[in-house]
Amino acid sequence: MNRRTLYSALCVALVCGAAPALAKDPPPVAPPVLSAAVDNDPTHDPDNVLLLDLSNGGRVAIRLVPAWAPQHVERIKTLAKSGFYNGIIFHRVIDGFMAQTGDPTGTGQGGSQLPDLKAEFNAMPHVRGTVSMARTDQPDTANSQFFIVFYPRFALDRKYTNFGRVIAGMNHVDAVQRGEPPSNPTKILQASLASENKPQLLPPPVSAAPSLTASGLSGAAPSLLDAPRPVSPAAAAKTARPAAKPATAGRPAAIAAGAKPKP
């Protein structure tokens, strides 16, 4: 065997020996570990803090968590900055369960003009104050509606896209009017991001009705009761009483009997 043949054989052996190593799959990449903890300071990362000014006079701060559901967080931010949520009611509020909003029609059947989102279900627990996307019985139908849970509802985990949590003003969520829909629904007066630095929008003051006092009633009563009323001749004739005594000379009998003159 000459040198050329030996060199060729050696190359073949090296390639064949290396082939199994080249054919191995790369090691799997571990998925990112999500934390259920959220930053409760609304001044931190204000571009991911949603503020809801409600018609009950409260302001609610929601921490949006892009790591949990990036597409859903981006949708909420887009709609809030466009003013989409302003004036929308909480149309479905079940005591002990959740408060749902985000439908411009107020019926639970509406949404935005943007396309529906693909589900981003995650393992984050639905604890008190969780904000999650509403949808139909099909997973990829979330659009603009969302709900806030009053108490833990772990049965919703991995079935609805959990994208944030209330970090301030949960007492104002608790005060939202109940009903499906409520008879006097609570509204979102203004939705904004904390980074926009919009002042809180408060409901207009309710003007109090003028109060009626006892002195006011007593002062008004005489003028109403003593107001002269027109009397027809026929009615006057029926109500006039006969004179108890003979008429005094020179005076009409009706006056002597005490009848009032016509106005």
Image: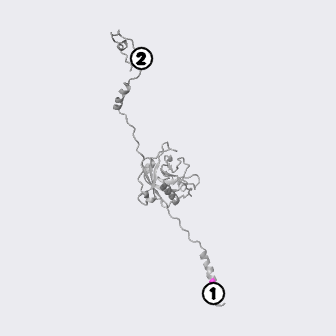
Comparing labels 1 and 2, the label whose residue is closer to the camera: 2
Q: Secondary structure at mark 2?
A: helix
Residue 104 locus on image (x, y percent) = 52, 49
- On residue 120, which mark appears? none
> Is 229 contained in the magenta span?
no
* Circle 1 Cα neighbour tier, 10 Å, few/some/many (<14 / 14–19 / ≥20): few
Q: CA distance from mark 1 to mark 2?
A: 145 Å
Say which amino acid is labelled 2: Ala
Determine the residue positioned at 60% across, 76% down: 22
Q: Is residue 124 visible?
A: no
- Whether tag 1 and tag 2 are in contact, CB under 8 A, the answer is no
x and y percentages locating residue 255 in the rendered image: 35, 14
Which residues, given as a range, are shown in magenta?
6-11
Closer to us: 102 or 226: 226
Please give the label number shown on residue 236.
2
Specify whether residue 10 is painted magenta: yes
Count all numbered tags in the image, as a single digit.
Answer: 2
The kind of residue on which mark 1 rests is Tyr
Residue 106, position as x, y percentages in the image:
52, 47
Which numbered disc flags the more N-terminal residue, 1 or 2?
1
Image height of 218 relative to 142, above or below: above
Q: Residues within 10 Å of mark 2 (few under 14, many from 20)?
A: some
Residue assigned mark 1:
7
Residue extending furthest toward the right: 1
